Amino acid sequence: MTFSPPAPGRASRGELLRLRRLAQAIDGPREPDPAAAARRLLALQGQDFAAGCWALALRTTGATQADVLAELDAGRIIRSWPMRGTLHFVPPEDLRWMLSVTADRMVAGLGRRQQQLGLEAADFAHAADVVTAALTGGNSIGRAELMQLWEDAGIATTGQRGYHLIYYLAQTGLLCWGPVVRVGNGNPTQALVLLDEWAPAPPPLSADEALAQFLLRYLHGHGPATVRDFVWWTKGTVAGAKTARAVLGDALTTLEVDGVEYLVTAELLERAAATPASRAEKEAVHLLPGFDEYLLGYQDRSPILDDEHAELIVPGGNGIFQPIIVAGGRIVGTWRRDGGRVLPQPFAPLTPAREARLERSARAYAAYAG
């Protein structure tokens, strides 16, 4: 069966979710490697490093955790705070133009916190000089080592001062997280590098062109979304979203789903109409990580998550999102890893067919994790 909205400009909730899964490379053709997955989505949440690595890999034709770490080591994917004060995995060629849209608003909101921490302009300038001298020439440095470097230079890093310095210097385009650091048998993390040495120069975009690029790339990798979804995702403004929409013109169209208007790229609609929904796609059960863009890429999560289950996804409202089981495009449970096993926790018993598909996804995760 092919995608065919029931009426011009209208679609069902199921069709909306299929378009999103196609856009996110969860169903349909996957990307060849993790760097291509990052380019597809533009940004994937990465505050949980391990979860973010799985989010990249599951959108490929079979990348392992080692493959993702190799892409990070090679600089084909970097991690920073491009928006919302949240760490994301992003393509290196896109980070600086993204910051050109978001950084001023983000930095403007830091004044009170800087006062609380006793940080002044001279502190940021001194910290920047110290870390630039240490990293220039292709060097990298771990977080703990950077804290000690700053302390030795007379810059206090206690009480979250050090973390805030890193965050500010990343927001202003000096630093980003780059190569992987492996300490003993612990989980891998990343070292800091100079963004100018780790990423190519950004394209010469005007302010309006950068806004338009942001909206187009968001929709390209996330599928149909509302203006409010985009404004929330970027922590931007409605006025900025309207400007971007005007610049893009016929590249975008709209769908109405349950009385709500969604923006969508004309390219995605054409691709979906030409791509039969295979039996494997319709019956697929996916094991997505915590903080995955399929859930967190939108302000309104009601199309895929029932209110009654929200507490199970974020227990106690603590901001820690659990890994999710997705079937038929909707969240049907959570899961966790116990050693080498995947332990599913469905909201209700799964059908035998979904149990079999879940087991297939568990094997895929095991192959990824090694």
Image (cartoon, rainbow, N blue to C red):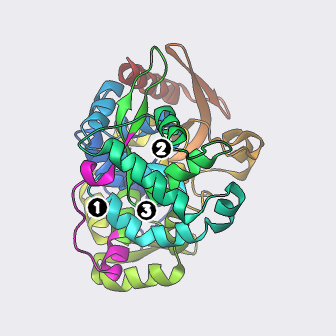
50 left or right of 218 in image: right
How far across and how far down the image is residue 326, in percent? Answer: 52, 40
266 left or right of 188 in image: left
Return the residue at label 3. 172
How far across and how far down the image is residue 137, in percent? Answer: 23, 43
Measure how far apart labels 3 and 2 are at the Cα level.
Answer: 19 Å
Residue 257 in view, yes or no: no
195 falls in the magenta region: yes
Quadrant in which the C terminus is drawn: top left
Q: What residue do we see at 61% from left, 37% from top? A: 322
Q: Are marks 3 and 2 in contact (CB under 8 Å)?
A: no
Span shown in magenta: 192-213
How far across and how far down the image is residue 341, in percent? Answer: 52, 15
Residue 134 in view, yes or no: yes
274 relative to 337, above or below:
below
Q: Quadrant of residue 159?
A: top right
155 relative to 217, above or below:
above
Describe the element under mark 3 as helix, strand or loop: loop
Is 135 in front, or is 204?
135
Circle 3: residue type: Thr
Question: Which residue of the protein is positioned furthest toward the right in this rendering?
Answer: 316
Return the residue at label 1. 273
Q: Quadrant of residue 349?
A: top right
Q: Earlier in the sequence, mark 2 or mark 1?
A: 2
Is 205 in front, or is 257?
205
Q: For mark 1, does the 10 Å Cα neighbourhood hold few (<14), some (14 to 19), or many (20 or more) residues?
A: some
Q: What residue do we see at 74% from left, 47% from top? A: 308
